[in-house]
Image (cartoon, rainbow, N blue to C red):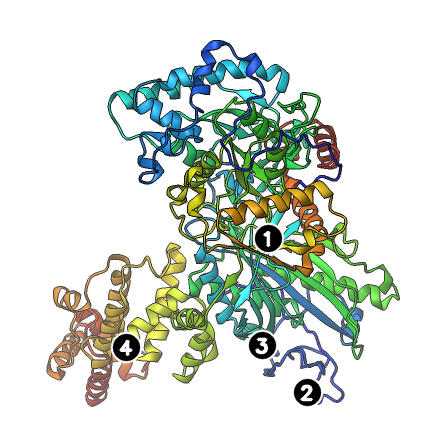
């Protein structure tokens, strides 16, 4: 959601644009045993990258990928899936009371699935690309074994009878859904304060918001409560909290990931996006959930290329891996009215891209100013339509009444937040 | 055949400037108006024996009718007989236990998305082409938003401004009993949409239950131009649509099951006025005869109000037809057009059709009722026969199959409309259920025509063929039914009969010539019905008169 209120950005150190540096905001909370996960983020050995990431057993060429580190640890029997899961669960238990990023945590099912993963390893079976990876799922994405409230009281306790396609695919790849994360109600908001249940804190500074609407998912990854997480983005709700929480947030193109199972906000704009502590992790998760889905008529039939094999180590800046790629910067985003620090961030990104070999050119997009009004018209009308179904009659909370009109009115008045109404 | 329970032939005499064929009284079908909305060709068939008028009209009112022109339009919803629903994979079976054919999509659960069933498009194009419409190569779906418990998503996926078919017409023939005549009614549009669920109200009115089995079933909405001018025309229009959807196989068109639903819009205006009068919608019409009677009642009501100078009390509203009291009553006032807040459905891509696709569908169309009727007419059948044979696609198929095997047109028609139809009525079976096959009917007709068996024998074995099946040739052989045409043989039998009945012969001699029939009957009995009547009577006459 595009924020209409300016929040003090937490400027995280001078964030080096590459991802070698891993600030760990909650290190003071971690008992010794949890440092195992820290060892996973050690700088790499100096080795050239080998074949596509999915076959890499030694993750040394992509040291910053938690997913690949976990995979390496599992396959080399250094750690078991249960051990990894337990360490994350412990961290959640310790940190969630303060951060409140999770609305629901499924300890039992997490350990069960981890055990299953261990059994697979014992039997030397093929492991999916997300094996042993704990995933947080934003609560407006349907999961069959956990409540999906979309952050609203009108769906309090509602359990969908199906998994969202993205969740199903992540699970099929071996991912373990650890729980459902907090959000602004129905995805409408940019601070996660709009949740009907609790307010999530930014792990970097608990007095600050994590952004929104996917604040819970961003905070969870930021606080290392899970490896990666799924969020949703309609008007910035993955990108903005990622920035606020200092993690990687990836919003794919509309149609790249199936929307089946995503509680609709604005159908033309909604997408499911990925959070990770590194670009590689966000990318691996995206690859796992992308692709055409026959249950979503708007999902793209375009092939999903194996882009994870294209990830290169940061050591190879000199080789200019993005040579030949032309990137445009929209002039209108750098003009008057844009905050100076925002402009300088963009310019820093531009020079980074140039370092990687891109040719960057300024382009003009005269219709840029029409974007916001178009967004508001589409988002308001589509969301009002998509929320019509919450009347308390078939599912969710209902306020009893004698007359139909009042039944609708009272149920919705009581359980829908201001913004939704 | 549509059985119209017309209580009488209703007159709607409409004034032309000078209409020499116009009479106030019985027998004239209404003439064309000067409005060019419909191209109608009237056949005037004076029918002096037809009963007229019903209980709800009287003489003075009758005189008023000529001053007013009825304007009737019909909205029809046709439930498509696709294997699965419009936007999900659920089947639909009428009469299933409540909420047994549902899934997250048709329930509108959070996160569910619709995916279009391509058969719906095929059926829509089929019907659009059969109604002579222009098919839109690019159409889209829209959301029609309103709140009601049987509408799970809070909106209905429909088509608003770009329907799949527009601007067509339907041709039909009015039944002979009401004066016949060819009619053409315009079709404004045909569009695709989904059905809502059903509400079941408790007896004591304390609560209602929602059954979502029907939610998401594909519908085609057909909107007619306001071209009908009487209850009968409207009823026939409905019947023709039913015929069409059954011919095409896109729906079973059962009004009782709700797979064909009609709402009518009725208004009147003084003859000569160009503005339409206030329109009233009538719902709860469960049969074609109900359509007929409801419209007539409503027209009476409106004409009456007009004549009393109370035209203002006709408001734009929805009225329900009550079968019990045979009246329309107010249901709810229509406060102008409801705001349905239409906008394009973002979850479904545009429907893009190619000319090739449309051509393929067009090639796959069966012979439509109108074409069949014209073909049968050309074969020399009377209008009554044509309508009987063409109205039911299964009957037409039976008829056509018999003709294909060489059966004579008139004879086949007579057998089907006569003995076979009577059997079907008595035993309450369909023509597809009788054991007689079109091949055997053709064989039977040929046998009679060639003289192999007599007409009387033919009728007898027909009954057996219908009830038990079998082959004509075998039956003739087994039962030894071949007609006796040998004069000598017949003469023998005649002689026998005459000698056995001397008294009657005596009576005949004395003048009771009617007894010839008696003798003929006896000879027939003697021959077990096989004697050729022509030969029999010729020889018999000879014999009887010769002895004189």
Label 2 resides on the chain identified as: B
Which callout, 1 or 3, points at the residue further toward the start of the chain?
3
3D distance between C-alphas at marks 3 and 4: 33 Å
Quadrant showing the C terminus of chain B: bottom left
Label 3 resides on the chain identified as: B
Residues marked 3 and 2, same chain? yes
Q: Which residue is mark 1?
A: B345
Q: Which residue is mark 4?
A: B407
Marks 4 and 2 in Cβ contact (< 8 Å): no
Q: Residue A146 location in percent, x, y?
A: 51, 24
3D distance between C-alphas at marks 4 and 1: 55 Å
3D distance between C-alphas at marks 3 and 2: 21 Å
Which callout, 2 or 1, points at the residue further toward the start of the chain?
2
Residue B243, can we see it?
Answer: no
Q: From the viewer's perspective, is the residue at label 4 or at label 1 nearer?
A: 1
Q: Which residue is mark 3?
A: B184
Which callout, 4 or 1, points at the residue further toward the start of the chain?
1
Q: Which residue is mark 2?
A: B21
Helix, strand or loop status at disc 3: strand
Helix, strand or loop status at disc 2: loop
Q: Is residue B17 above or below residue B460?
A: below
């Amino acid at each position: 959601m595009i924020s209409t209120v300016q929040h003090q950005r937490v400027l995280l150190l001078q964030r080096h644009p590459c991802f070698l540096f891993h600030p760990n905001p909650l290190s003071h909370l971690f008992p010794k045993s949890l440092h195992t996960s820290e060892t996973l983020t050690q700088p790499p050995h100096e080795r050239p990258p080998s074949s596509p990431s999915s076959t890499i057993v030694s993750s040394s060429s992509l040291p910053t990928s938690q997913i690949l580190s976990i995979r390496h640890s599992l396959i080399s029997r250094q750690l078991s899936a249960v051990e990894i899961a337990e360490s994350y669960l412990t961290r959640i238990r310790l940190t969630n009371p303060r951060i409140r990023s999770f609305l629901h945590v499924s300890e039992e099912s997490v350990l069960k699935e981890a055990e299953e993963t261990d059994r697979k390893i014992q039997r030397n079976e093929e492991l999916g690309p997300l094996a042993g990876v704990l995933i947080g799922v934003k609560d407006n994405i349907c999961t069959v074994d956990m409540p999906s409230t979309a952050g609203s009281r009108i769906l309090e306790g509602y359990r969908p009878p199906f998994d969202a396609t993205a969740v199903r695919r992540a699970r099929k790849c071996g991912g373990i859904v650890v729980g459902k994360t907090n959000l602004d109600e129905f995805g409408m908001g940019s601070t996660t304060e709009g949740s009907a249940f609790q307010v999530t804190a930014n792990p970097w500074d608990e007095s600050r918001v994590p952004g929104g609407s996917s604040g819970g998912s961003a905070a969870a990854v930021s606080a290392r409560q899970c490896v990666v997480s799924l969020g949703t983005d309609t008007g910035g709700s993955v990108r903005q909290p990622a920035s606020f929480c200092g993690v990687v947030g990836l919003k794919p193109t509309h149609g790249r990931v199936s929307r089946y199972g995503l509680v609709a906000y604005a159908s033309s704009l909604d997408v499911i996006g990925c959070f990770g502590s590194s670009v590689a992790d966000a990318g691996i998760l995206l690859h796992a959930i992308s692709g055409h889905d026959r249950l979503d008529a708007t999902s793209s039939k375009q092939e999903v290329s194996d882009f994870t094999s294209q990830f290169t180590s940061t050591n190879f800046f000199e080789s200019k891996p993005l040579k030949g790629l032309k990137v445009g910067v929209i002039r209108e985003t750098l003009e008057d009215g844009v905050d100076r620090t925002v402009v300088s961030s963009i310019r820093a990104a531009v020079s980074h891209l140039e370092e990687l070999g891109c040719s960057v050119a300024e382009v003009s997009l005269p219709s840029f100013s029409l974007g916001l009004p178009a967004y508001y018209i589409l988002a308001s009308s589509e969301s009002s339509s998509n929320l019509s179904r919450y009347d308390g009659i078939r599912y969710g909370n209902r306020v009893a009444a004698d007359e139909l009109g009042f039944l609708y009115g009272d149920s919705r008045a009581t359980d829908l937040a201001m913004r939704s109404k | 055949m549509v059985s119209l329970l017309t209580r009488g032939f209703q007159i709607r005499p409409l004034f032309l400037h000078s209409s020499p064929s116009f009479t106030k009284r019985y027998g004239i079908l209404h003439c064309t108006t000067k409005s060019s909305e419909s191209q109608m060709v009237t056949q005037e068939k004076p029918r002096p024996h037809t009963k007229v008028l019903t209980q709800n009209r009287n003489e003075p009112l009758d005189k008023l009718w000529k001053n007013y022109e009825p304007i009737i339009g019909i909205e029809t919803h046709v439930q498509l007989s696709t294997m699965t629903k419009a936007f999900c994979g659920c089947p639909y079976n009428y009469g299933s236990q409540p909420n047994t054919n549902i899934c997250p999509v048709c329930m509108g659960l959070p996160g569910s998305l619709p995916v279009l069933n391509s058969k719906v498009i095929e059926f829509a194009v089929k019907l659009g082409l059969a109604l002579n419409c222009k098919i839109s190569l690019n159409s889209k779906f829209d959301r029609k938003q309103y709140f009601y418990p049987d509408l799970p998503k809070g909106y209905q996926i429909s088509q608003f401004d770009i329907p799949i078919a527009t601007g067509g017409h339907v041709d039909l023939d009015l039944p002979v009993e009401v004066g016949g005549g060819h009619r053409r009614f315009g079709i404004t549009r045909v569009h695709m949409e989904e059905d809502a669920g059903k509400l079941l109200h408790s007896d004591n009115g304390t609560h209602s239950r929602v059954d979502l089995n029907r939610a998401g079933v594909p519908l085609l909405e057909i909107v007619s131009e306001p071209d009908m001018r009487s209850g009968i025309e409207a009823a026939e229009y409905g019947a023709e649509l039913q015929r069409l959807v059954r011919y095409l196989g896109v729906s079973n068109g059962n009004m009782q099951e709700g797979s064909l639903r009609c709402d009518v819009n009725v208004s009147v205006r003084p003859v000569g006025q160009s503005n339409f009068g206030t329109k009233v919608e009538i719902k709860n019409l469960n049969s074609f005869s109900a359509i007929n009677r409801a419209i007539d009642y409503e027209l009476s009501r409106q004409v009456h109000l007009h004549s009393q100078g109370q035209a203002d009390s006709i408001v734009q509203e929805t009225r329900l037809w009550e079968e019990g009291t045979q009246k329309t009553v107010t249901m709810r006032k229509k406060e102008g057009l409801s705001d349905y807040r239409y906008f394009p459905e973002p979850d479904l891509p545009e429907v893009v059709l190619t000319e090739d696709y449309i051509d393929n569908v067009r090639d796959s169309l069966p012979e439509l009722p109108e074409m069949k009727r014209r073909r049968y007419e050309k074969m020399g059948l009377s209008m009554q026969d044509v309508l009987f044979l063409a109205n039911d696609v299964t009957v037409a198929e039976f008829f056509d199959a018999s003709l294909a095997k060489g059966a004579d047109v008139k004879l086949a028609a007579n057998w089907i409309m006569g003995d076979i139809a009577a059997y079907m009525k008595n035993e309450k079976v369909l023509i597809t259920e009788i054991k007689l096959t079109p091949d055997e009917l053709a064989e039977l007709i040929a046998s009679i025509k060639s003289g192999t068996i007599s007409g009387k024998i033919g009728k007898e074995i027909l009954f057996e063929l219908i009830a038990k099946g079998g082959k004509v040739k075998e039956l003739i052989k087994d039962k030894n039914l071949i007609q006796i045409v040998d004069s000598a043989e017949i003469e023998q039998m005649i002689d026998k009969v005459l000698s056995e009945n001397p008294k009657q012969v005596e009576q005949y001699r004395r003048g009771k010539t009617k007894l010839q029939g008696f003798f003929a009957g006896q000879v027939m009995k003697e021959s077990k019905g096989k004697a050729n009547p022509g030969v029999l009577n010729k020889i018999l006459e000879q014999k009887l008169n010769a002895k004189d």
